[in-house]
Amino acid sequence: MNGNQTLTMIKPVAVERNYVGSIIQKITDSGFKICAIKMTQLTKDQAGVFYAVHKDKPFYEDLTTFMSSGTIVAMILEKENAVDDFRKLIGATDPVDAEEGTIRKLYAESKSHNAVHGSDSDENAQIESDFFFSKIERY
Ligand code: CMP
């Protein structure tokens, strides 16, 4: 990965509430190209692997239970400076702290049910993209 890509998931509650279309529209309106997209449901073990970096955190059990509780939409997004620009677009982890107009301000319920995930580094963007997508699923 070249630093111009990031990985996002639209989380179960946002899918359940039918926010997928609105969230994708906001992402593409902000200049991101969708290179890969997949609707799926993670097992609890898969959610545990994806969020392994948080395995010692007190919220890990709730996080992996929530993230395996329903359908998600995973995407690889491309844009110059993708990781940082996408984190600006989604806003702070807790929607209470997120700026007006950000995806989490608009669509998140709470810090744990915060509508979308975004990679926090180029290295993790690559690891997370490889978790979901093979080479022939990327465009
Ligand atoms: P995400 O960007 O998917 O990365 C890790 C997730 O853990 C984060 O969004 C939040 O949904 C969740 N998270 C982070 N901190 C907390 C916390 N203190 N309590 C509950 N969930 C948290």
Image (cartoon, grey):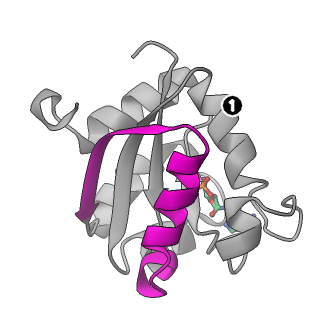
Mark 1 Cβ and ligand 1 under 8 Å apart: no
Task: Estimate the x, y position of residue 138 in percent, counting from the top left.
Answer: 22, 33
Q: Nearer the viewer, residue 30 or 99?
A: 30
Left or right, 87 with respect to 15, comes to right
Q: Which residues are magenta?
A: 13-39
Q: Is residue 55 visible?
A: no
Q: Nearer the viewer, residue 109 or 30?
A: 30
Q: Which residue is most to the left?
A: 136
Q: Which residue is most to the front?
A: 29
Left or right, 109 with respect to 105, comes to left
Is residue 17 found inside the magenta-colored segment of the image? yes
Is residue 96 found inside the magenta-colored segment of the image? no
Q: Nearer the viewer, residue 25 or 47?
A: 25
Quarter in which the C terminus is drawn:
top left
Q: Amino acid at mark 1?
A: Asp
Q: Is residue 132 visible?
A: yes
Task: Estimate the x, y position of residue 56 in percent, counting from the top left.
Answer: 60, 51
- The residue at 15%/27% (across/down) is 135
Left or right, 30 with respect to 46, comes to right
According to the image, label 1 marks what residue?
Answer: 84
Ligand 1 shows up in which quadrant of the image? Answer: bottom right
Dot 1 alpha-carbon crowd within 10 angstroms: few under 14, some 14 to 19, many 20 or more = some
Image quarter for residue 108?
Answer: bottom right
